[in-house]
Image: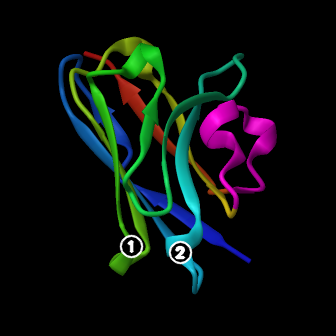
Amino acid sequence: QVHLVESGGGLVQPGGSLRVSCAASVVSFNTYTMGWFRQAPGKEREFVAAISWSGGGTTTADPVKGRFTISRENAKNTVYLQMNSLKPEDTAVYYCAAARYGRFFVSRSASDVPTWGQGTQVTVSS
């Protein structure tokens, strides 16, 4: 069983940067595909980025490509999302996602994620 805890959210001005982290409580973290989704008020949860168990493969949604970078440190059981050039439309609750077989890496579907964190609020506003 995996327990995920996000941190690092907050308020940032447009054009600014923020890094959110997700710490996983699990013995075999290096066998899990990890990812980030986000959900704005009144909208469905949407895929942001995912990273393979080794960190050798990543995939990023088009709206954030070139601005957001996902990475992981298996020694620390932690996955990160570095967000640069933030826009007001990036405002959302950001959720960490984990899956042993990583189906959502390809599908980008929230329905393929068995384990979620509690979410961290990111607000981009002047």
* SS for dot 2: helix
Q: Is residue 27 above or below residue 46?
A: below
Q: In this view, does 11 lie above or below 89?
A: below
Total tally of numbered discs in the picture: 2
Q: In this view, does 38 lie to the left or right of 61?
A: right
Ranked by sequence position, the earlier of labels 1 and 2 is 2
Magenta span:
101-115
The reply to whether discs 1 and 2 touch (Cβ–Cβ < 8 Å) is yes
Q: Is residue 93 above or below residue 19?
A: above
Looking at the picture, which amino acid does disc 2 mark? Phe
Looking at the picture, which amino acid does disc 1 mark? Asn
Per the image, the residue denoted by label 2 is: 29
- The residue positioned 38% from the left and 57% from the top of the image is 55
- Whether residue 121 is visible to the viewer of this picture, yes or no, is yes
Residue 108 magenta: yes
Expressed as whole percent of the image width and height from the top left, the position of residue 36 reads 52, 42
* SS for dot 1: helix
- State the separation of the CA atoms marked 1 and 2: 7 Å
Q: Which of 57 and 121 is in front in this view?
A: 57
- The residue positioned 53% from the left and 65% from the top of the image is 5
Residue 98 magenta: no
Q: Is residue 95 left or right of residue 87?
A: right
- Whether residue 24 is visible to the viewer of this picture, yes or no, is no
- The residue positioned 59% from the left and 81% from the top of the image is 26
Q: In this view, does 103 lie to the left or right of 83?
A: right
Expressed as whole percent of the image width and height from the top left, the position of residue 123 reads 40, 28
- The residue positioned 20% from the left and 33% from the top of the image is 17
Expressed as whole percent of the image width and height from the top left, the position of residue 89 reads 44, 13
Per the image, the residue denoted by label 1 is: 74
